Image: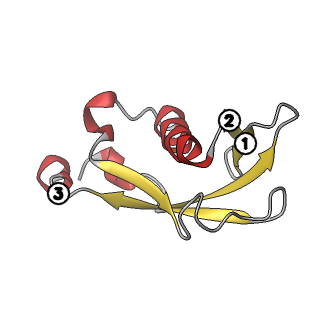
Amino acid sequence: MNKYANLPNKIKVRISKGKSGSLIAELVDFDAFTEADGWRELDYCINDLIFSYFDVPETVRDLIRYSSQPKLGKDKPNLNEDEIVFFKYFSSEARHVFS
């Protein structure tokens, strides 16, 4: 099995509001941060941060996705308080690549 299949199954994220009004996300267990201007962009930036932190190459990033429940932007968390869990998902093509 490929090493990218061994990425964490879930990652805790804490979101806060920056001084400029931007949204700041922290990967709680990894001391890594990213920021974005809106909720939709933040979802993309969190995935990019996870991939960068774990050195996932561009060639396999489309096969892996981290997503929160509830979805960011629909049910907004209490900023600075709630930890949101992002769960790992693989595309259907990933099984062929990672096996």
Residue positioned 34% across, 30% down in the render: 57
Residue positioned 73% across, 51% down in the render: 15
Q: Are marks 1 and 2 in contact (CB under 8 Å)?
A: yes
Q: Amino acid at mark 3?
A: Arg
Write down the residue under mark 1.
23
- Residue 10 vs 93, above or below: the answer is below
Q: Are marks 2 and 3 in contact (CB under 8 Å)?
A: no
Q: Is residue 52 left or right of residue 62?
A: right
In the picture, the quarter occupied by the C terminus is bottom left
Q: Amino acid at mark 1?
A: Leu
Write down the residue under mark 3.
95
Judge depth for marks 3 and 1 and give the one in front.
1
> Disc 2 or 3, which lies upstream in sequence?
2
Residue 66, percent from left and from top: 45, 54
Give the crowd class for mark 1: few <14, some 14-19, many >=20 residues within 10 Å.
some
Residue positioned 75% across, 36% down in the render: 22
Residue 30, percent from left and from top: 67, 45
The colour style of the image is secondary structure
Q: Is residue 94 left or right of residue 6?
A: left
> Disc 1 or 2, which lies upstream in sequence?
1
Residue positioned 68% across, 63% down in the render: 76
> Disc 3 or 1, which lies upstream in sequence?
1
Callout 2: helix, strand or loop?
strand
Write down the residue under mark 2.
35
Residue 5, percent from left and from top: 32, 53
Nearer to me, 33 or 18: 18
